[in-house]
């Protein structure tokens, strides 16, 4: 099975959730944005009837929205739980990841995507402070609970094996440690930290992180390191 | 089939997307928040392993996140397209509705849900201006395209019959005309307007809108009428 991923070429962004799934599965895929440039991505958005990237296509169909893409490909990629109820629960929790990622993005863009960060720095500082005080611990506590209360596994969030949800939680934690290291140091997340280490050591993920296919976090993506938005250095 | 809906009792909010589906289908359901108060909703959030309401439960299972709930119940409620590919597309577009609703909410709460509107009025004015300039027309244009380019129907967004997605678009349009009447008057949305009239006339929806079960829009929900955030009166 071959896939075509359409996403902006210069950031990990939301495309990275899909890339990690394809990489972990060893799937054949073309990263169209990096191969052919942003124009090919823009073209696919309108041609395929999508609102925004990432878009994943196979020979027959294309899909957008990270959670929807992952629900679509997790079974063929063998990154889904076997049980149908677990599958629904995985998708549901992935949608909570979607909401969390939107709030993380909004810490540096509270006034909307149409203004540069420099045009909204003051609002970003206020939004980040309330995010770190209230929302960050609430989301992390929720995901800690998901991991520590999975009746079927001590290692994975839903069912018995590594799923696209685990890969997504791994990406979110790496991104948060990049963007908000000081805030993270104040919150206890043993299960998420253990998951992050476990995923980073998987053979294909480790090889991917080490490859040129993997784009480093940078200040154009979701997870940005603006020290003025983090807690002060301890 | 009986359902239990868990949502805050005093606002239409995100619960309304689920309510409309249950009402259109003539399903039996208990609106637990309105019946038993907000405490019963808070209890269900933690008991069921959910992050936030709305939560819908049947005798066997519970689900949260509007798009996920609607994907789960649309088939038993006969509000889903028959074709599997159409079903996936419906869910995908519903996730674009989810993103749109989050951006609509953020017009009055750009600095986060932890502060009152009065504490973020200036930021809200800036966010609303860029929302009305760029995001509102972009989303509405996208949904207009979905409706006018459905190869299977001139009336509905996906497939041949009314789905949960059509009911959701109806709610979004009603909410936008409530919150941003002046901004809406500047944008041409013939297909969405026609859909809104069509849904409002459906027997069960009309009866619901006329009943005490239906909570009016108010200034605690997603769609709020703050004239200072809308375009000025023409």
Image (cartoon, coloured by chain):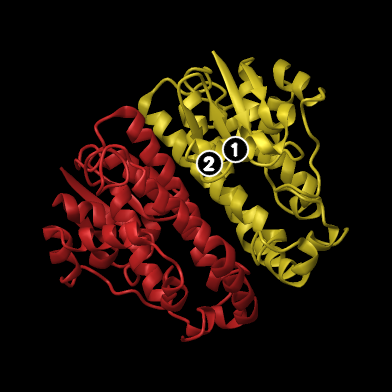
Chain colours: A yellow, B red
Q: Nearer the viewer, residue B59 or B5?
A: B5
Q: Residue at x 49, y 56 (%)?
A: B139
Q: Nearer the viewer, residue B195 or B112?
A: B195
Q: Is residue B47 visible?
A: no
Q: Nearer the viewer, residue A102 or A139?
A: A102
Is residue B171 left or right of B93 when viewed as pictured?
A: left
Rounded to the nearest angstrom, the CA distance separating label 1 from label 2 is 6 Å
Secondary structure, mark 1, is helix
Q: Which mark is residue A43?
A: 1
- The quarter in which the N terminus of chain B is drawn is top left
Image-quadrant location for residue B159: top left
Chain under callout 2 = A
Which x, y percent locates residue B68?
39, 43
Q: Residue at x 45, y 54 (%)?
A: B52
Which x, y percent locates residue B188?
41, 65
Q: Is residue A48 above or below residue B34?
A: above
Image-quadrant location for residue A157: top right
Which x, y percent locates residue B10?
33, 72
Is residue B17 left or right of A58 when viewed as pictured?
A: left
Image-quadrant location for residue B129: bottom right
Chain under callout 1 = A
Q: Residue at x 20, y 57 (%)?
A: B30
Residue of label 2: A46
CB-based contact (under 8 Å), mark 1 and mark 2: yes
Secondary structure, mark 2, is helix
Residue density around tag 2, few if under 14, some if 14–19, many if 20 or more, within 10 Å: few
Q: Is residue A195 visible?
A: yes
Which x, y percent locates residue A124?
73, 66
């Amino acid at each position: 099975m071959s896939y075509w991923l359409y996403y902006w070429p210069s950031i990990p962004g939301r495309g990275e959730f899909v890339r990690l799934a394809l990489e972990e599965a060893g799937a054949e895929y073309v990263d169209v944005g990096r191969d052919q440039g942003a124009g090919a991505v823009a073209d696919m958005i309108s041609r395929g009837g999508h609102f925004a990237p990432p878009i994943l296509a196979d020979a027959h169909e294309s899909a957008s929205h990270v959670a929807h893409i992952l629900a679509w490909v997790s079974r063929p990629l063998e990154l889904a739980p076997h049980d149908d109820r677990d599958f629904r629960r995985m998708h549901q929790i992935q949608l909570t990841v979607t909401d969390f990622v939107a709030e993380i993005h909004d810490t540096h863009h509270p006034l909307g995507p149409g203004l540069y960060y420099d045009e909204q720095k003051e609002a970003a500082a206020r939004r980040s402070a309330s995010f770190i005080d209230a929302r960050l611990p609430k989301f992390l506590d929720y995901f800690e609970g998901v991991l520590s209360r999975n009746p079927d596994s001590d290692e994975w969030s839903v069912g018995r094996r590594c799923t696209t949800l685990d890969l997504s939680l791994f990406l979110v934690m790496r991104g948060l440690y990049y963007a908000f290291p000081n805030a993270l140091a104040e919150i206890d997340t043993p299960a998420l930290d253990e998951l992050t280490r476990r995923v980073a050591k998987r053979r294909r993920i480790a090889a991917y992180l080490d490859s040129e296919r993997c784009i480093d976090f940078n200040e154009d993506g979701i997870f940005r390191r603006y020290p003025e938005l983090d807690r002060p250095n301890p």
